């Protein structure tokens, strides 16, 4: 799950003792890719190494057709509280200096404003859209949905919004956490809106020029409440017929957790889909706490949800979870055990943040693992691969699992994953330093996989 995190909290997390590097098994599938990152398979990036304070938080990525990688998130240093941040890497992991002059781009609304990016989308023409939130200053309690669009060279796109930027107020504490693009070029921005601690699912649709699409929802926007507590869209998919599927965690307690898995489906016009769940939404409870954070569409209308389920010991003992649903939002009993599969790494906090379905139907998931508690920053990159029917694939990593720690760090957290055309797996997230002076950095790992994702 995604949180607004203070720079100082993140740097404090970096003061814990260093952890040793673990790069998984030597099996071809799941091994770190030696052709990336100078032979290590790993890359870390600071946006301003000269600053005594750095917090560079990677949240999403795209793979370009030429094999280059674009990673987006936010960057903070002593000179600016936080900006949207993008890095573009060559196929070998080196920075691409044709992007922004150095391979790095930062953008915001002003020197003292705060912008945090969580979602990245590449349009067919190569333009890049980043979504997140913005506040006028660190003291501003009100934050808005924000989109920024960049040209392929990293410059702001003047044809989008005002100077490449769009800010939308949904009425309260508004965050964009995920983006999707419709076939007609319209953009969907999903996330959350509402008072802090009592957010609702929030979704807005924008025209290709950045203007709100007033034919969607109510004046281009909609919100959905599940349990009166904290609800967030963290995964979004557009069905072939144009309907929209959203998934995320729903907090049920006075301080957010414990959580349930929340699913909602909307018509093309932004109305609840009455053929899905109850009045267009489904709320599911598993174990002591559970959360939905990833989606993938399957043939025939079925879909996968990735996230976490705490089966014992509270949320700090959450496991990877993958569930398969029928088109009407019911669990598919032919998958795993009663429609779901859970995977434990080390009896700590493990949670899926992204999932992909390979050409042969196998399922790859990535997420943070081994955290002592949610948001601790002392975990590792974790991957698992499953067969199409929900069994761990023993030909991947060590008994279907891969664990990776970055050398010189106290931990890292997975935020996104993509599969390249050659089947290799790219995972990104923040890396927390053993020494605070180094600063939190973008982390990128690339793994070997069977050819072409088989």
Image (spheres, rainbow, N blue to C red):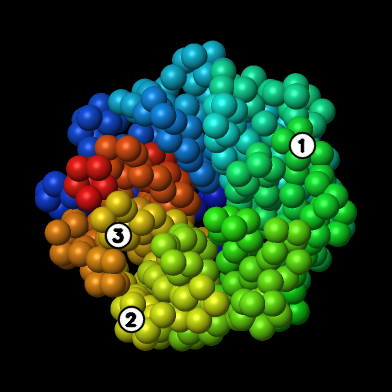
Residue located beneath label 2 in the image: 334
Residue located beneath label 3 in the image: 361
Outermost residue, left side = 27
Name the one closer to the observer, 137 or 250: 250
The reply to whether the C-beta atoms of the residues labelled 1 and 2 are less than 8 Å apart is: no
Residue located beneath label 1 in the image: 210
Task: From the top left corner, tell me how far across and down residue 107 is, in percent.
Answer: 68, 28
What residue appears at the point 75 percent right and 24 percent down from the top-left corner?
Answer: 159
Residue 69 numbered mark, or none: none
Task: From the top left corner, tell me how far across and down residue 14 is, in percent.
Answer: 46, 48
Name the one closer to the observer, 105 or 120: 120
Q: Secondary structure at mark 2?
A: loop
Of the numbered discs 2 and 3, the one sitting upstream in the chain is 2
Q: Secondary structure at mark 3?
A: loop
Distance in Å between CA atoms under marks 2 and 3: 15 Å
Name the one closer to the observer, 117 or 234: 234
User: For the residues carrying marks 1 and 2, which lies nearer the camera in this image?
Assistant: 2
The reply to whether the C-beta atoms of the residues labelled 3 and 1 are less than 8 Å apart is: no
What residue appears at the point 27 percent right and 37 percent down from the top-left corner?
Answer: 422
For disc 2, the neighbor class at 10 Å (few under 14, some 14 to 19, many from 20) is: few
Of the numbered discs 3 and 1, the one sitting upstream in the chain is 1
Q: Quadrant of residue 185?
A: top right
Please state, as top left, top right, bottom left or bottom right, where the N terminus lies in the image: bottom right
Is residue 423 toward the left or the right of residue 269 in the image?
left
Task: From the top left corner, tell me how far across and down residue 33 is, in percent.
Answer: 23, 38
Q: Secondary structure at mark 1?
A: loop
Distance in Å between CA atoms under marks 1 and 2: 43 Å
Distance in Å between CA atoms under marks 3 and 1: 36 Å
Instruction: State whether residue 448 is above or below residue 402.
Output: above
């Amino acid at each position: 799950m995604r949180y607004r995190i203070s720079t100082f909290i993140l740097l404090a997390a970096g003061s814990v003792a260093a952890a040793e590097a673990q790069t998984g098994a030597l099996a071809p599938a799941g091994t770190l890719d030696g052709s990336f990152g100078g032979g290590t398979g790993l890359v870390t990036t600071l946006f301003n190494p000269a600053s005594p304070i750095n917090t560079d938080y990677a949240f999403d990525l795209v793979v370009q057709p030429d094999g280059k990688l674009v990673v987006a998130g936010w960057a903070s240093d002593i000179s600016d509280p936080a900006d949207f941040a993008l890095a573009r890497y060559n196929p070998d992991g080196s920075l691409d200096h044709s992007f922004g002059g150095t391979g790095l781009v930062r953008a915001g609304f002003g020197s003292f404003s705060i912008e945090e990016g969580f979602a990245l989308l590449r349009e067919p023409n190569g333009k890049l859209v980043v979504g997140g939130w913005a506040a006028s200053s660190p003291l501003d309690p009100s934050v808005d949905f924000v989109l920024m669009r960049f040209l392929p060279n990293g410059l702001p796109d003047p044809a989008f919004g005002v100077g490449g930027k769009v800010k939308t107020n949904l009425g309260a504490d508004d965050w964009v956490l995920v983006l999707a693009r419709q076939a007609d070029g319209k953009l969907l921005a999903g996330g959350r809106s509402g008072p802090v601690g009592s957010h609702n699912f929030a979704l807005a649709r924008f025209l290709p020029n950045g203007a709100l699409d007033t034919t969607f929802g109510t004046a281009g926007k909609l919100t959905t409440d599940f349990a009166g507590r904290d609800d967030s869209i963290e995964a979004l998919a557009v069905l072939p017929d144009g309907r929209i599927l959203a998934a995320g965690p729903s907090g049920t307690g006075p301080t957010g957790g414990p959580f349930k898995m929340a699913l909602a489906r909307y018509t093309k016009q932004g109305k609840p889909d009455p053929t899905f769940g109850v009045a267009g939404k489904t709320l599911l409870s598993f174990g002591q706490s559970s959360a939905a954070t990833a989606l993938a569409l399957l043939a025939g209308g079925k879909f996968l949800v990735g996230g976490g389920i705490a089966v014992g010991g509270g949320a700090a003992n959450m496991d990877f979870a993958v569930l398969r649903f029928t088109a009407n939002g019911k669990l598919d009993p032919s998958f795993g055990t009663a429609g779901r599969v859970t995977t434990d790494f080390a009896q700590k906090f493990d949670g899926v943040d992204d999932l992909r379905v390979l050409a042969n139907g196998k399922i790859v998931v990535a997420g943070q693992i081994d955290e002592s508690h949610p948001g601790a920053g002392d975990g590792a990159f974790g991957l698992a691969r499953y067969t199409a029917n929900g069994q761990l694939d023993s030909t991947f990593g060590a008994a279907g699992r891969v664990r990776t720690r970055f050398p010189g760090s106290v931990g890292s957290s997975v935020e996104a994953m993509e599969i390249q055309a050659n089947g290799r797996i790219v995972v990104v997230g923040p890396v927390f330093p053993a020494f605070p002076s180094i600063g939190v950095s973008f982390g990128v790992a690339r793994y070997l996989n069977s050819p072409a994702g088989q």
